[in-house]
Image: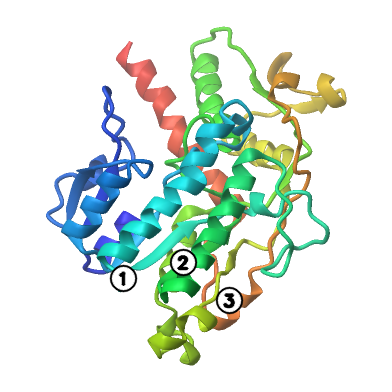
Amino acid sequence: MADLCISKGHEVYGMVRRTSTSNDINFKHLLDKPKFHLVYGDSLDGFSIDTLVRNINPDYFVNFAAQSFVGCSWDIPEETFLAGAVGVLKCLEAIRKNSPNCRFYNAGSSEQFGDVVYCPQDEKHPFRPRSPYGAAKVAAQALVKVYRESYNLYAIQGMLFNHESERRGEEFVTRKITKGIGRIVRALQRSESFEPIKLGNLDAKRDWSHSQDFVEGVWRMLNQEKYREEVKIPKLWPKSLREYVLSSNETHTVREFIDIALKEAAIEGQWSGTGVDEKFISNGSVIVSVDPKFFRPAEVDILLGDSSLIRKELGWKPNISFENLVKRMVKNDLPHAKEAQGQE
């Protein structure tokens, strides 16, 4: 999102929490850009958010802050809900008090649909979350609606289906797969033993897209009057602003993701067994195995989005296919194995 805004000529203030160890890998390339400014704050610290909004007086406020790992939300439900819902409330309050003309976007999620009642899921699908993470996002969307209608704010929350990229955190299943393949390729190159990639439900179906496509969708949501005639009069905002689904309109299993990733890494083999005994075996070695500890207490079996509305009204569409997304992530992680080999 920061890359996109800078490319459009905007100055970007990127808020991070103060920590004892640096975690700048995903924005390190921005630190020397004159239009990028790193600022410290925390969405749960109302004072810091209030101060930043007052001092910066932003045109846009894009909130991606959250405890964003769904699987972990059962382990730390309170933190997940505080960051995902109460933090949003503090952001809205800061905008209301200090910068009411600021346009606010909050990151929603397909996890809000949860225990789905029909496929594909569109903007009319009821919210039926099956995790503390999903529940937090539902609460946040209700707050965004309240502030939009109560204070005439340009405040929206998009419902984004799974979006990945080469910058994805390593605890998420997609990056866990591609990083694991890079590790295994390195071991194979050196004729070393290795641990298999251990995963949970291989049959879970997700609607995966590339984050690069989705941030363009977010940008269009934040500038709806450029695409929809009925949004041009600010006083009509509460009724005319829309909150859209972003999705690829395709669904693929975790197993399909693995198959494409292994093929891209030139690892041949076959699946064996069923359920918790299922494995992918290559030349007698187990590459992928199932570990029940990665099963969720309440699984969302299938997520498939219908983003027809934003495609029709705002002219958005994804440009990176599921297959190319997987290939890009694998290619990004394979060189690390080769570099590590050369350094040792």
Residue type, label 2: Tyr
Where is residue 194, by image quadrant? top right
Residue type, label 3: Arg
SS at mark 1 in the image? loop
Mark closest to the chain's N terminus, 3 or 1: 1
Packing grade of label 1 (10 A; few <14, some 14-19, many >=20) is: some
SS at mark 3 in the image? helix
Q: Residue at x 54, y 44 (%)?
A: 327
Q: Which residue is mark 1?
A: 100
Q: Which residue is mark 2?
A: 147
Question: In the rendered view of the protein, which quadrant contains the N terminus?
Answer: bottom left
Rendered location of residue 208, percent (x, y):
62, 51
Mark closest to the chain's N terminus, 3 or 2: 2
Residue type, label 1: Pro
- The tally of labels here is 3
- Near-viewer residue (255 or 16): 16
Q: Which residue is mark 3?
A: 311
Packing grade of label 3 (10 A; few <14, some 14-19, many >=20) is: some
Q: Measure the C-alpha gap from mark 3 to mark 2.
A: 26 Å
Rendered location of residue 247, percent (x, y):
61, 61
- Judged by depth in the image, the label closer to the viewer, 3 or 2, is 2
- Near-viewer residue (84 or 178): 84
SS at mark 2 in the image? helix
On the question of residue 305 being in view, the answer is yes
Q: Is residue 88 left or right of residue 309?
A: left
